[in-house]
Amino acid sequence: MIDCDGFRSNVGIILCNSDRQLFWGKRIGQDAWQFPQGGIRQDETPEQALFRELHEETGLLPDHVRVLGVTRHWLRYRLPPRMVRRQNQPVCVGQKQRWFLLQMVGSDADFQLDAVPPQEFEAWRWIDYWRPVHEVVYFKRNVYRRALCELVPLMFPELAQDRRIVNPAACKAGQ
């Protein structure tokens, strides 16, 4: 679904393990890493899209995760002009995303990146919380930063009073 401003509705998935590391997927055939994400179909709620996309991209089922939270608002990013497909109607200029934070309750053996074709990721790993902000493709960095900043108190509740952790300078940039 593309809204009247040209943004496609989408869900983003931040999946953490018991060591509070995040799932980081390598896109198939590319040297690009990102969180799972995908479009919301017209007949879906964001929550339904979350579980569909989680299964399609990682092979995980709802029983393998627990939802910890979701961003309060849509977070948007624009595609670089060279990536906008102007021949498509309606024209999509970017994504608007609701980001979900999930806790893995299954095991690493539950991942099946090839469960649903076409396969999105060819590899994955667990990484530190703030690393994606620096490694994701440049035009998604602000959205990743905003989602991680908003959801960090759910991952690190014991640090909620420490503004250096919950609201680092990186969180102020772009907000």
Image (cartoon, helix red, strand yellow):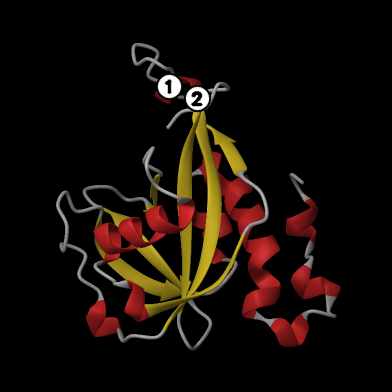
Q: Residue furthest top?
A: 87
Q: How many marks?
A: 2
> Could you tell me residue 36's position as x and y percent?
39, 57
Above or below, 108 relative to 57: below
Using the image, tell me which numbered label, if any, was put on residue 93. Answer: 2
Question: Which residue lies at the image location 29% right of the left edge and 71% below the top edge?
Answer: 60
Q: Which residue is mark 1?
A: 84
For the question of whether residue 162 can be seen, the reply is yes
Which amino acid lies under the numbered mark 1 shown in the image of this protein?
Answer: Val
Percent position of residue 19, x then y? 50, 88
Q: Earlier in the sequence, mark 2 or mark 1?
A: 1
Q: Is residue 50 above or below residue 75?
A: below
- Residue 99 appears left or right of 152: left
- Judged from the image, the secondary structure of the residue bearing numbered disc 2 is loop
Spatial separation of the CA atoms under disc 2 and disc 1: 6 Å
Q: Is residue 160 above or below residue 19?
A: above
Circle 2/circle 1 CB separation < 8 Å: yes
